[in-house]
Image: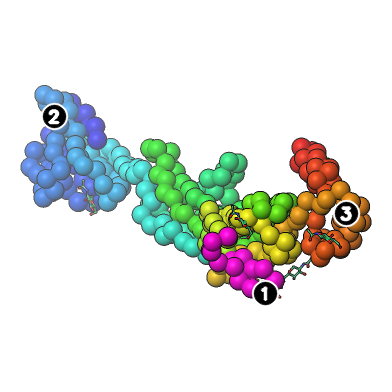
Amino acid sequence: LRCYVDDKVSRVAWLNRSNIIFAGSDKWSLDPRVDLVSKGQLEYSLRIQKVDVFDEGSYTCSIQTKQQAKTSQVYLIVQVPASIYKVSEDMIVNEGSNVTLTCFANGRPEPAISWRLLNPSADPLDGDEYLDITGIMRNQAGRYECKASNDVAMPDVKYVNVVVNYPPTIKKTHSSVTQVGGMGTLQCQATAIPVPEFEWYRDEKRLSNSQSINIQILGTTTILMIANVTDEDYGNYTCVASNRLGVQNASLFLYSECPFRSSSPALVSWAGPGMGRDINGSSCVSASLWLLLSCIAGLLLQC
Ligand SMILES: *[C@@H]1O[C@H](CO)[C@@H](O)[C@H](O)[C@H]1NC(C)=O
Ligand SMILES: *[C@@H]1O[C@H](CO)[C@@H](O)[C@H](O)[C@H]1NC(C)=O
Ligand SMILES: *[C@@H]1O[C@H](CO)[C@@H](O)[C@H](O)[C@H]1NC(C)=O
Ligand SMILES: *[C@@H]1O[C@H](CO)[C@@H](O)[C@H](O)[C@H]1NC(C)=O
Ligand SMILES: *[C@@H]1O[C@H](CO)[C@@H](O)[C@H](O)[C@H]1NC(C)=O
Ligand SMILES: *[C@@H]1O[C@H](CO)[C@@H](O)[C@H](O)[C@H]1NC(C)=O
């Protein structure tokens, strides 16, 4: 804090609010951070090291000449960079619950708090120290960024990871057409958090790994492989996906390739509900119909 004097001055002092820090060159303050800077007789400046917020306030350089007393006042404003001192812990919540994320920061001037969900759009969210999310949805899961800024220095940033649990939805199933003696492969894919557990059923009977059956689970997908398919293997299978929030099941079919003569019954029964059975009691799809269906599916997917 600068203060300049001339040679007519007889007495000088520095005050912090109304407390004397220096009277002439006598130090009254006990604060070791404070000292005088004087160049020759003409400067009587005050130096404060390691300034903190408590130093904010008015300082007075008081000058007395033979004729009069003069004061020169300086108001010291202390700025402090924004700093986040408390933020929500990472959390795991169920879809639909109400969530409040918190972020507290100090700094001078008072920092502004803003939130973003770090997904590709990362749009700013409407919140301050509290970010309220009513009925959180699965697409609101992710890494939340809290930013505190007050233009004194770089903003301070902290993160909260939010995991949203939801029950399984079977997204995709893949039935299979296989000849007797071939390998039948049924596939079932579900989305769920936590990762779903899978079970396979043939009618009411739970299937497990055996000589002819191999069940694989790769994250959110399960594959049922039936080696050396026999006539009894054709028909309806159920894939069940579950986690602690719920369960969903889906029906899949192991079809046989129809001999030519039964291709029209298959065509007829395809139009009916579910998959029909041919004269021998096993479901089938003619190879040509299957190809046609795959083509249509391929075209639809490209759209
Ligand atoms: C100024 O006064 C305030 C309040 O008494 C005190 O907290 C602060 O440390 C003082 N600062 C200096 C530089 O003397
Ligand atoms: C979530 O908040 C909404 C609106 O504030 C309220 O109607 C609802 O009951 C809350 N749900 C739960 C599970 O607390
Ligand atoms: C397949 O099996 C499931 C479960 O047993 C049953 O709900 C479903 O109706 C069956 N589908 C057909 C087409 O038979
Ligand atoms: C498939 O099953 C038939 C009849 O059960 C058997 O004769 C044949 O050896 C099996 N083939 C393979 C590759 O396991
Ligand atoms: C499939 O779901 C239905 C209805 O949710 C249920 O009644 C049936 O038992 C389930 N099937 C299996 C094999 O879990
Ligand atoms: C299907 O049934 C016909 C007679 O109805 C029989 O000739 C044929 O061998 C059977 N095919 C199979 C695969 O069982």
Q: Amino acid at mark 1?
A: Glu
Query: Within 10 angstroms of label 2, few (less than 14), some, or many (20 or more) residues?
Result: some
Mark 1 residue element? loop
Q: Nearer the viewer, residue 292 or 209?
A: 209
Residue under the point 44% across and 43% down: 149
* Mark 3 CB near ligand 6 (8 Å cut): no
Question: Is residue 270 shown left or right of residue 145?
Answer: right
Q: Quadrant of ligand 5?
A: bottom right
Q: Nearer the viewer, mark 2 or mark 3?
A: 3
Viewer-nearest residue: 233 or 303:
233
Relative side of 60 to 215, left or right: left
Q: Position of residue 42 (x, y in %)?
A: 16, 25
The answer to whether residue 179 is magenta is no
Q: Residues within 10 Å of mark 3 (few under 14, many from 20)?
A: some
Q: Amino acid at mark 3?
A: Ser
Image quarter of the N terminus: top left
Question: Closer to the camera: disc 3 or disc 1?
Answer: 3
> Which is more N-terminal, label 1 or label 2?
2
Q: Position of residue 171 (x, y in %)?
A: 68, 55
User: Is residue 206 found inside the magenta-colored segment of the image?
Assistant: yes
Determine whether the residue tagged by mark 2 lies in a helix, strand or loop.
loop
| Picture disc at residue 38 | 2
Q: Which residues are magenta?
A: 199-212
Q: Which mark is first along the chain, 1 or 3?
A: 1
CB at disc 1 and ligand 3 closer than 8 Å: yes
**Is residue 47 visible in this depiction of the protein?**
yes
Neighbour tally class for label 1: few under 14, some 14-19, many 20 plus, Cα within 10 Å: few
Task: Name the residue beneath numbered marker 1.
Answer: 204
Q: Which residue is mark 3?
A: 262
